[in-house]
């Protein structure tokens, strides 16, 4: 019986191969969605924005970083840095699953996979990569430290607050100057803008006033008005809204991490 089915399948395959239009018309099983390991922060938003912009089917797998879910063996197997975001794409290269961690690497992967928001032409690609790496190596870490010392540190350390607030101010100035000459960071709307927009969304927490940066404000307003970006920002994770950063249990998970 098995052999008969195999033979019939072989004939069908041969036929399909010789009639490509028939193959294309045959209903394909629905593609499995990409799994997005996510928590609603600027780094998480980068990827929900890209998935929404590309219209890729995805499911959100919340990683409650306030409870330590970033340290589970299952999560560390795909994101060894115990940080979200990460993705698992069931239809990776060669049709096999692939996991990707680090927001910049995920954006580049999705850009290559879809051919969207990450141009192939070398000059345009270099421009996107310059601003993407500028974000992941500069704006993100500096803004993160500014928020930490302004809002989360147990003591008010003036030197640390001034150092990171000033550095973020400098970086906002760099974006503002760039955006005076270009509509988007790399010219056209790209993964570089998606990487930066979530951080600019939290400007106030970083001690910044967008009114001081009119070109940056114009850019921010244009991006947040995009339907895909609105959908990404609208994803609600109720447990995240309930996190109390003053709770000693939460602080013990998030702060003072050392090698394990
Ligand atoms: N370089 C990483 C940074 C990601 C990151 O810092 N994620 C934070 C939330 S915004 C996180 O998962 N924190 C968990 C923890 O601190 O243990 C990336 O760009 O993906």
Image (tube, rainbow, N blue to C red):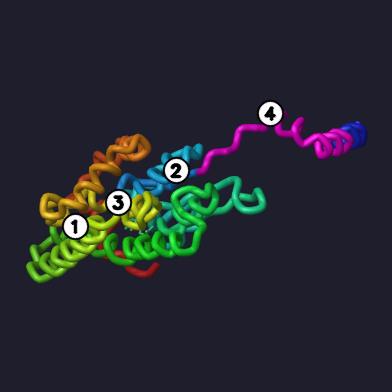
Which mark sits nearer the N-terminus, 1 or 4?
Answer: 4
Mark pair 2, 4: CA separation: 24 Å
Residue 183, which numbered label?
3
Q: Secondary structure at mark 3?
A: loop
- Camera-near label (2 vs 1) is 2
Q: Is residue 216 visible?
A: yes
Tag 2 near tag 1, CB within 8 Å: no
Majority secondary structure of magenta residues? helix
The label number, if any, that marks residue 27 in the structure image: 4
Q: Decide which of tag 2 and tag 1 comes sooner along the chain.
A: 2
Range shown magenta: 10-34
Task: Determine the secondary structure under disc 4.
Answer: loop
The percent coordinates of residue 113 (x first, y second) are: 55, 50
Q: CA distance from mark 3 to mark 1?
A: 28 Å
Q: Quadrant of the C terminus?
A: bottom left
Q: Which residue corresponds to the image point at 50% horizontal and 40% vertical from the top-left?
A: 56
- Disc number placed over residue 51 in the picture, else none: 2
């Amino acid at each position: 019986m098995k052999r008969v089915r195999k033979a019939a399948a072989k004939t069908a395959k041969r036929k399909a191969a010789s009639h490509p239009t028939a193959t294309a018309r045959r209903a394909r099983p629905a593609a499995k969605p990409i799994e997005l390991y996510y928590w609603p922060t600027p780094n998480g938003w980068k990827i929900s924005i890209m998935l929404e912009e590309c219209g890729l089917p995805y499911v959100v797998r919340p990683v409650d970083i306030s409870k330590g879910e970033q340290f589970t063996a299952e999560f560390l197997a795909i994101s060894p840095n115990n940080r979200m975001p990460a993705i698992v794409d069931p239809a990776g290269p060669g049709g096999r699953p692939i996991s990707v961690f680090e927001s910049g690497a995920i954006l580049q992967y999705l850009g290559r996979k879809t051919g969207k928001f990450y141009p192939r032409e070398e000059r345009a690609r270099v421009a996107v990569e310059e601003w993407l790496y500028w974000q992941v190596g500069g704006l993100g870490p500096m803004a993160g430290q500014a928020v930490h010392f302004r809002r989360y540190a147990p003591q008010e350390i003036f030197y640390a607050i001034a150092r990171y607030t000033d550095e973020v101010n400098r970086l906002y100035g760099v974006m503002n100057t760039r955006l005076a000459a270009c509509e988007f960071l790399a010219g056209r709307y790209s993964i570089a803008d998606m990487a930066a927009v979530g951080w600019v969304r939290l400007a106030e927490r970083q001690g910044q006033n967008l009114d001081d940066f009119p070109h940056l404000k114009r850019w921010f307003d244009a991006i947040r008005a995009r339907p895909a970006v609105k959908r990404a920002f609208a994803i609600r994770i109720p447990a995240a809204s309930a996190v109390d950063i003053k709770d000693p249990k939460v602080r013990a998970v998030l702060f003072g991490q050392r090698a394990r």
